Image (cartoon, rainbow, N blue to C red):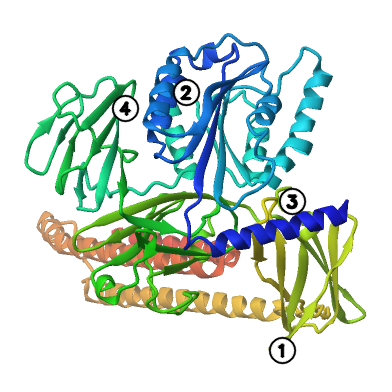
Amino acid sequence: MKSFKSLYSLLSIFIFYFASCSVYAADPIDSVRILIDISGSMKQNDPNNLRAPAMRMLVNLLPPGSEAGVWTFAKWTNEFVRHGKVTKDWQTAATNKASQIRSPGQFTDIALVLEDSSRDWDQPVPYERRSVILLTDGVVDVSKDPLRNIESRKKLLEEIVPYYKRSGIKIHTIALSENADIELLENLAVQTDGAHIMVKSADQLQKAFLKLFEKSVKRETLPLKGNKFSVDSSVNELTILVFNSPDSPRTELKDPEGNQFKKNKKPPKIKWHHDSGYDLITISKPKVGEWEIIADIDPDNRVMIVSDLKLKSSQVPNNLINGESFLYETWLEEEGEIIDKPDFHKFVKFSIEQTPPEGKTKSFTMKDHGLAGDKAPRDGIYTYKFAKSLRTTGEHEIITQVNGETFQREFRHTITVHDDPLSIETKQEIVDGKGKVDIEIMLTKDWIDPDSIEIAAEITYPDGLSELLEPEFDFDLWKLVVEDIELDKKYAINIQMIAQTGTGRPVNLRTPIIDIFMKSPEVEKPPIVEEPVIEEPAEEVETEEVSLLLIILVFVGFNLIVLTIIGVVYFFNKKEKPIPMLDEDEDEDEEGDEEEEPLEAEANNADEQAEEAIATEENLESEIEEKAADNLGESEVNASSGDEELDAELEAIAKENQDENKD
């Protein structure tokens, strides 16, 4: 079995290589097969039968010379529109047949329709680009017996998908319901390098079909700026797709001479098809110059052309892995020959606009200078290497644009970037003073061929030297052990995978660098205990006693001074006062009465001075008490008690003096 897989892998590589080498020589034929679900559940998910206008749009966008067919399916399958070459007659027949789409069926046999529609595609051929567009709203449902449904799903994944891979067929899937088997439809698409779209309502079907059409068929377009575009003399035919809503005004078209056309007012060379949600206009031999679409601006509007001057490109994968890179090439052809004339390319600019999932568009210039992957300078083939710009997972839109003096061209791709298919787990430990790292690598994506995987690791040492390491495969994972790692030094491990997808596309992937830095264990130091600074209470007590004594001395000294002043005043007042003589005469009594008046005044003055001294004393006592309270706490209370006793003595002395003065 493994030898068969190896043979198939070699055959796939050969076909891929042959196709890549021959892209400059011949353009493969586009062969598209459309599979439409008509089971009964479609009555709910597509109540307005919008599958019919979507099918009409798709078959009329197919370029002449391509191949196509339409199948419907439910319990049984039916070749709804015969597979064959796309011609005007074929398009007319398919357009008329679309109105017969209904939802009468029971069950949903996806495996059967994929089998029946591809019976003649048993071998891959390099001259044909094969695609299937599958529309369904359900799950694998072939019977009321659950076991039969499980068997059918298993057959689909284990037999039919490998057949599609071997035959080089891409499956593009549309899920017209959240109840559809999304996991299965994504698996069918990714394993065959197709695309998957989930739409929540049928009114999104037309744009979904357009997106998958552009993945299945290579049609170059003219850039639309607003609703204007320029036609050059090499354009033989235009196909204009204009999306509109029920409230939009009817689409009109203005040619370079200012003539305005409508669906019912147009020359015979203009073919105009109006349908639910869009207008499709085809013009043979259009006039050279600027045209204008008079309608609502929509980013999905397109102007597709058939021209002698063709924009070509290398094959672009629909699915990439985060971290993967690929080289993209594009060129111009005329009558099957690459245009490489230097005089022509002086006035031509090749560029790329890339819009990642977050929506911020970036622009890149493509070069033909023989550097950075470009094979040869001035050979007419322009190159750009996609790498870092595809680091974001999700869908990226890539628009290739060519601008010349007299012409413009455009080409669109979409690429879905998936997560890294390798799961890497690391475990670090220190053993006997050395570091050790255990690394386990596991494959997480089943669209990578496991038999084609080769994994190597490169370790970079602290001195900058590097060495290759080879992980050992053990059951379903790869193991790598790195020992004798010096502590406190930096190491780096880079893991590289070389493999193939299920379709044979080579994959060269480098994972993010694993940085290793293991620190030496820290030696525990005994904690430093700081001795507490103990203040000697004796000093505090002594300080408090000194402060208290000082306050008492100041207070006593002040009181002594006050008493001295009072005594001096009293002494002098008493000394100057005359001693009255007692006489029984009335005259003497009158004189004595007259003399008593100044003596009483003097006594009153002495009393007032004493009262002032006492007031001064009380104020001074209050200030001293407040200052002592701020500095000494409880000691102040004791000082205050002593002061009260002194105050009582002073008051007694003062009262005694007053009594004497009165006497």
Q: Is residue 659 left or right of residue 500?
A: left
Q: Mark 4: which amino acid?
A: Tyr
Contact (Cβ within 8 Å) of mark 4 with mark 2: no
In whole angstroms, how far apart are the C-alphas of marks 1 and 4? 63 Å
In whole angstroms, how far apart are the C-alphas of marks 3 and 1? 32 Å
Q: Which of disc 4 and disc 1 is earlier in sequence?
A: 4
Q: Which of disc 4 and disc 3 is earlier in sequence?
A: 4
Contact (Cβ within 8 Å) of mark 3 with mark 2: no
Q: Position of residue 456 (x, y in %)?
A: 77, 71
Look at the picture and state if 138 lies above or below 159. Answer: above
In whole angstroms, how far apart are the C-alphas of marks 3 and 4? 42 Å
Depth check, mark 4 against mark 2: the one in front is: 4
Q: Which mark is residue 278?
A: 4
Q: Is residue 632 left or right of residue 554?
A: right
Residue furthest toward the top? 104
Task: Residue under label 2, please give it.
Answer: 201
613 or 56: which is nearer to us?
56
Residue sitting at x 51%, y 59%:
390
Q: Which of disc 2 and disc 1 is earlier in sequence?
A: 2
Q: Which of disc 2 and disc 4 is earlier in sequence?
A: 2
In whole angstroms, how far apart are the C-alphas of marks 1 and 2? 58 Å
Q: Mark 2: which amino acid?
A: Ser
Q: Which of disc 2 and disc 3 is earlier in sequence?
A: 2
Residue sitting at x 12%, y 54%:
586
Task: Residue under label 3, please give it.
Answer: 444
